[in-house]
Image (cartoon, rainbow, N blue to C red):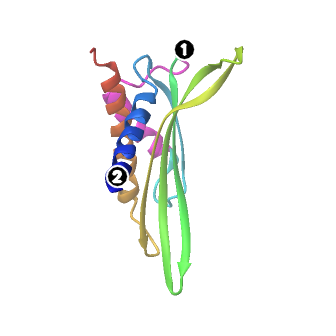
Amino acid sequence: MRRIALTLLLVSSTSLAQERPSLSTLQGISAVVASSAHPDIEEGALVRHAEERLRKAGLLAEPNTTAAGRLLVDVYVVRSRYGRCQYLAYDVALRLEESATLERSPGERIQAVTWRGTGRTSRFTSALPAESVMEIVDNKLNALIGDAAKDRTPR
C-alpha cells in the first residue's frame, strides 16, 4: 500500500513541475512593490534590497519596459496566544505579476501571477529579529533568480 501512494506522489509532483510557466521570455522586472508588517523592516529598504539583488542577476529592467514583470514582496504578521505563551510568525510572499491576455477575451489584458514563493519564520516569543525575515526574502529571491536563469539556459 505504501508503494502505491509513493508512486502516485512522484507522478503527481512530476506533472506539476512540467506545468510550471517558463520565465525564459521574461524581459526583466521593472518594478518592485513591497509591504512590511515587521517593525524593523521598512518598505523602502525592502524594495531597494530586492532591486539590488535583481540588478546583480541582470533581471532589473527599466521602468515601464514592455513585457516586463512586477515583483510584489509582502511580509505579513501572525500573532496568537497559547496560555501564557505568545506565538509570533512572519509570512513572506513574493509574487511575479506579468501582463497577460485572456483566451476568452483576447483584447483584454490583465495582471497575472506567473511565479510565487512563500515562507514562514516563527517562534513562541514576543519578537522576531528582522534578519530571520530577510533570510526568507533572500531565499525566495534566490529561487526566482535561479528559475529565471534555468529557463534562459539554452537546451
On-image quarter of the N terminus: bottom left
Instruction: Please tell me which residue is depicted at 47% across the width and 51% down the height of the picture.
Output: 92
Instruction: Please tell me which residue is depicted at 35% across the width and 57% down the height of the picture.
Output: 131
Counting from the top left corner in percent of width and height, residue 84 is at 51, 87
Residue 55 part of the magenta-drawn span: yes
Q: Which mark is residue 112?
A: none
> Is 55 or 107 nearer to us in this picture?
107
- Distance, label 2 to label 1, CA atoms, is 31 Å
Q: Which mark is residue 135?
A: 2
State the SS at label 2. Answer: helix
Which amino acid does the dot numbered 2 rest on?
Glu
| 33 relative to 56 in the view: left or right | right
| Prevalent SS, magenta region | helix
Which amino acid does the dot numbered 1 rest on?
Thr
Instruction: Please tell me which residue is depicted at 56% across the width and 19% down the height of the picture.
Output: 64
Q: Earlier in the sequence, mark 2 or mark 1?
A: 1
| 66 relative to 119 in the view: left or right | right
State the SS at label 1. Answer: loop
Q: Residues within 10 Å of mark 2 (few under 14, many from 20)?
A: few
| Count of numbered labels shown in the rendering | 2
> Is 150 or 8 nearer to us in this picture?
8
Q: Residues within 10 Å of mark 1 (few under 14, many from 20)?
A: few
Check the image and name the residue furthest to the bottom. 84
Please provide the residue range marked out in magenta: 44-64
Q: Which residue position is annotated with label 1?
A: 66
| 40 relative to 110 in the view: left or right | left
Instruction: Please tell me which residue is depicted at 36% across the width and 59% down the height of the picture.
Output: 132
Residue 51, by quadrant, is top left
Residue 121, by quadrant, is bottom left
